[in-house]
Amino acid sequence: MGRHPKPFTCAEITQTSREVRESARTDMIGTETELLETRLGGYSPRDRPNDMARLSQGAEVAEQTIRFEDGAGYEQMMGIWSRLVGEVFLQWLAPPPGLRWIDVAAAMGPSPSCWLSDPPLWRWRGLIRPKGSSPSLAHDPRPKWQSLPKAMPWHSPSPLAASMQPSWRWSWYSFPTP
Amino acid sequence: MVRPGGTVATYMWDMLGGGFPLDPIILEMHGMGLAPPRPPQMGASRMEALRDLWNAAGLKDVETREITVQRTFANFDDFWMTKLKAPSIGPTIAAMESRDVETLKNRVRAGLPADAEGRITYGASAHAIKGHVPK
């Protein structure tokens, strides 16, 4: 505890994201992966298949509590990775324009909102803030809930909800236009 | 709850196949006999597990794909200091003896080749899935 760094601003995150995009390839998908990795000379732990078993063994060790308390550090450490994947993921989902978005359980900071609200066709409504989530959200002006409201506070016939679980996945729930 | 015709999709880091961004360090920690904290139920990130879940939920037109990305760090120290911010391995490494930390750093460094400018580039991979609620 005690580490409550100032969260990144949207401008800072956008700038970081732009720099990352310039230095990283995000279009590596499916069968192109191996080819592109070879071309870029990039290292992947997958180059060491004999060590992969250790990761599985790791799943068997006692699960210890992982506390997410440093939103800015997490953004730098993982958020940049997540956006690189997220951009490809969104292109693949190809959601129709004009949807409204909600961030569910985005406990770590403001980056998802910047990431999603950057394109003008997406609009941001609010986020779920679980108990114990990042203190960096304290000054986030978006509406927050402790859990998904039974009556969603939106009135659009075409909302789309987005969910981020800290550290390793995004989940999306869409409600298409009738 | 998703409307008829709505999309349900997710991606998850390939936690057991070397796709997680922290895996270059986690692998070496395992190699040193250390057991850093891991997220629960990492097996859920397997593509087969995702597909089973989507099919069991009755979703249609289920498609999967792998998403691999690369990120470049200015140098090894940039990579190392950034990754120490991880709430999983960070506290574990902070509690290690300094000589053990140096051993770990050297092991990780040996596995992460730098380019001519000293930059570190490596990849991470996620499993993505999408499907539709029947209309």
Image (cartoon, coloured by chain):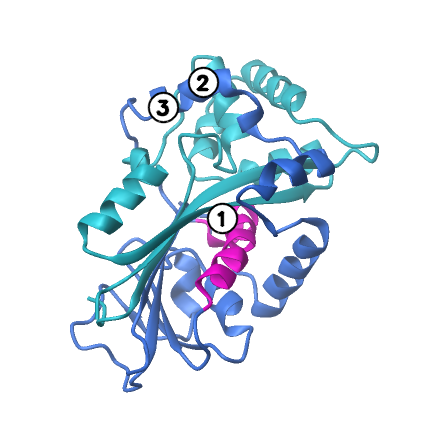
Chain colours: A blue, B cyan
- The number of callouts visible is 3
Residue A154 vs B13, above or below: the answer is below
Label 2 sits on a secondary structure element that is helix
The picture places residue B79, in percent across and down from the top left corner, at 64, 36
User: What amino acid is labelled 3 in the image?
Assistant: Ser
> Looking at this view, is A102 or A106 the one in front?
A102
Q: Which mark is residue A74?
A: 1
Q: Nearer the viewer, mark 2 or mark 3?
A: 3
Mark found first going from the N terminus, 3 or 1? 3
The answer to whether any part of residue B75 appears in the image is no
Answer whether residue A41 is magenta in the image: no
The picture places residue B90, in percent across and down from the top left corner, at 48, 34
Label 1 to label 2: alpha-carbon separation: 23 Å
Q: Chain of mark 2?
A: B
Q: Nearer the viewer, mark 1 or mark 2?
A: 2
A131 displayed left or right of A139: left
Which residue is at 41% across, 24% downward? A55
Whether discs 1 and 2 lie on one chain: the answer is: no
Which residue is at 36% across, 42% downward? A67
The picture places residue A176, in percent across and down from the top left corner, at 32, 76
User: What amino acid is labelled 1 in the image?
Assistant: Tyr
Marks 2 & 3, CB-CB < 8 Å contact: no
Task: State the quadrant of the C terminus of chain A.
Answer: bottom left
Q: Which residue is mark 3?
A: A56
Which residue is at 19% across, 66% downward? B1
Residue B113 vs B63, above or below: the answer is above
Q: Which residues are magenta?
A: A70-94
> Looking at this view, is A53 or A164 the one in front?
A53
